[in-house]
């Protein structure tokens, strides 16, 4: 305990051997204000600040918080003496393509660091890289905005209107509004490899082959240890969660009720994709395999010439695309017949997505590449005729957004604008929940809301709320504190 005038700080850590918890918890009392900071050792962590009526009540609240953590195994420590736990970054190699022709690339945007995250929707393209940058572009390559996240982006996933980035700091950020926020904070012993979100439920696959399922309130629901390690695939829908690892693909009931099926694959799974009735596993043994979601049976195999880092399909699985470790991209028909193989011109595709006769790749050299995948363009490319690649440049004054880490980072308003929605933070069963105050909503439902800016009794204004199937609301638009 250190004291400076009326300020006192207690710093605790919990670090377990064998890949267990590796977390810190810090409580600072400054007069009537108590500030709690917590997170993974070595990270900045999240901060919550509460003001009490008297100094005595503030000290009592702080002592209670410290006591609770000590009983859970936390102990006093010196900040900075214990090193952060090492984060696993995917080790990939990328050889030159052996294809005789190069893909018809329309445009290319270099992000500056190896990129794993991609999502393409009706309005824009998203790319996230290992430096923690997420850029949005329109379909013609104009850069619209940048999100600056605290750590490397493992993947980008969409759940209806919402876009999420899973990062090396163990957090999953909601990027759906101008102010990104940490929607989920993964346990310190989970080394994220990949994630998916379905109806607000987060599914996380990790280095040890575990599957961890977390609800919209960032609360653990269930977990399973699969037969294999290095789980680079997780996909989810109403019927199951599909978990791909070095021994194959395992399907689990969404409620944690148990294993539905397990299918060994030809090589360890390095990437996964899903359509309505099938999942696709790209493997280290140079194939993509299509598995029935109902039975797990292998329905088709798509043979490549090097380990498969990524795969995707056109709607309904009519065409199947794959990217390999040798900087090539492939297209197959539904039954497995190879239609073409072309070089990417920008390294190996670590992730990909097809949309409207275009194939979007993110690559080992950090590029987002837009390939014209129309029949005419591919035919011309096979004959050696390709368009001149347009290299996209950053705008001089690009809007940049960073996550909210404290309530002070949120703007304030005197009154709610017309059409806006008011929500309130309330204590409920020992947890700080958020409920809707405005008319026309179910006040018993929770609101998925940034933990870092929650304060007891505080009210916030949001642009809109949307109901989710699990019986909760999601925020759309900006968040402002109501004075």
Image: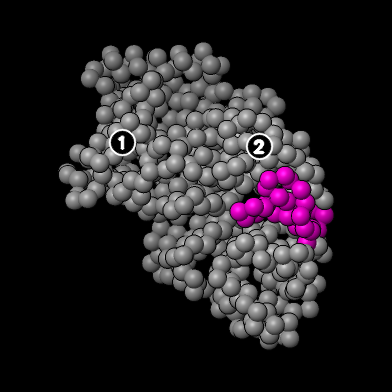
Relative image position of residue 386 (x, y in whole percent): 65, 83
Query: Front-most of 445 and 15?
Result: 445
Q: Residue furthest left?
A: 414
Position of residue 481 relative to residue 139, above or below, is above
Position of residue 300 relative to residue 195, above or below, is below
Q: How many marks?
A: 2
Dominant secondary structure, magenta? strand
In the image, the segment drawn in magenta is 273-302
Please tell me whether mark 1 sits on a helix, a strand or a loop. Answer: loop
Judge left or right: residue 54 versus residue 333: left
Q: Which residue is mark 2?
A: 252
At x 68%, y 40%, the residue is 251
Q: Quadrant of residue 299?
A: bottom right
In 3D space, how far apart are the residues under numbered discs 1 and 2 (Cα atoms)? 32 Å
Is residue 168 something that shows in the picture? no
Residue 442 image label = 1
Relative image position of residue 22 (x, y in whole percent): 59, 28
At x 53%, y 45%, the residue is 197
Colour pattern of the rendering:
one colour
């Amino acid at each position: 305990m250190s004291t400076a005038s009326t300020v006192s700080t207690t710093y605790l850590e919990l670090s377990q051997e064998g890949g267990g918890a590796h977390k810190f918890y810090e409580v600072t009392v400054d007069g009537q204000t108590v500030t709690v900071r917590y997170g993974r050792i070595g990270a900045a962590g999240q901060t919550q600040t509460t003001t009490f009526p008297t100094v005595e009540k503030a000290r009592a609240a702080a002592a209670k918080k410290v006591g609770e953590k000590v009983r859970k195994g936390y102990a006093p420590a010196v900040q900075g003496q214990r090193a952060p736990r090492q984060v696993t970054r995917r080790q990939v190699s990328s050889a030159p393509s052996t294809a005789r022709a190069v893909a018809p690339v329309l445009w290319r945007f270099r992000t500056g660091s190896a990129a794993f995250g991609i999502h393409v929707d009706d309005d824009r393209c998203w790319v996230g890289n290992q430096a923690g940058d997420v850029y949005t572009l329109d379909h013609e390559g104009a850069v619209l905005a940048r999100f600056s996240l605290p750590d490397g982006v493992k993947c980008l996933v969409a759940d209806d209107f919402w876009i999420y980035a899973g990062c090396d700091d163990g957090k999953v950020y909601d990027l759906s509004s101008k102010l990104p926020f940490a929607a989920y904070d993964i346990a310190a012993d989970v080394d994220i490899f990949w994630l998916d979100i379905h109806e607000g439920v987060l599914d996380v696959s990790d280095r040890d082959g575990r599957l961890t399922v977390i609800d919209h309130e960032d609360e653990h629901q269930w977990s399973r240890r699969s037969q294999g390690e290095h789980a680079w695939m997780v996909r989810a829908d109403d019927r199951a969660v599909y978990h791909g690892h070095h021994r194959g693909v395992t399907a689990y009931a969404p409620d944690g009720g148990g294993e539905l099926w397990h299918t060994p694959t030809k090589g360890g799974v390095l990437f996964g994709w899903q359509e309505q009735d099938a999942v696709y596993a790209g493997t280290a043994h140079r194939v993509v395999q299509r598995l029935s979601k109902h039975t797990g049976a292998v329905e088709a195999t798509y043979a490549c010439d090097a380990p498969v880092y990524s795969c995707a399909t056109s709607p309904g699985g009519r065409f199947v695309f794959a990217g390999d470790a040798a900087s090539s991209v492939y297209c197959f028909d539904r039954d497995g017949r190879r239609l073409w193989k072309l070089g990417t011109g920008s390294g190996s595709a670590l992730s990909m997505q097809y949309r409207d006769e275009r194939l979007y790749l993110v690559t080992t050299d950090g590029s987002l590449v837009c390939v014209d995948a129309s029949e005419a363009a591919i035919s011309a490319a096979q004959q050696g005729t390709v368009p001149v690649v347009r290299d996209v440049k950053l705008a001089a004054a690009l809007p940049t957004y960073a996550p909210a880490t404290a309530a002070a980072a949120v703007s304030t308003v005197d009154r709610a604008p017309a059409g806006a929605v008011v929500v309130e933070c309330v204590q409920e069963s020992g947890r700080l929940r958020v409920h809707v105050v405005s008319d026309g909503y179910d006040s018993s439902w929770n609101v998925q809301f940034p933990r870092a800016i929650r304060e007891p009794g505080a009210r916030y204004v949001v642009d809109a709320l949307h109901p989710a199937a699990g019986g909760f609301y999601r925020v759309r638009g900006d968040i402002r504190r109501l004075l």
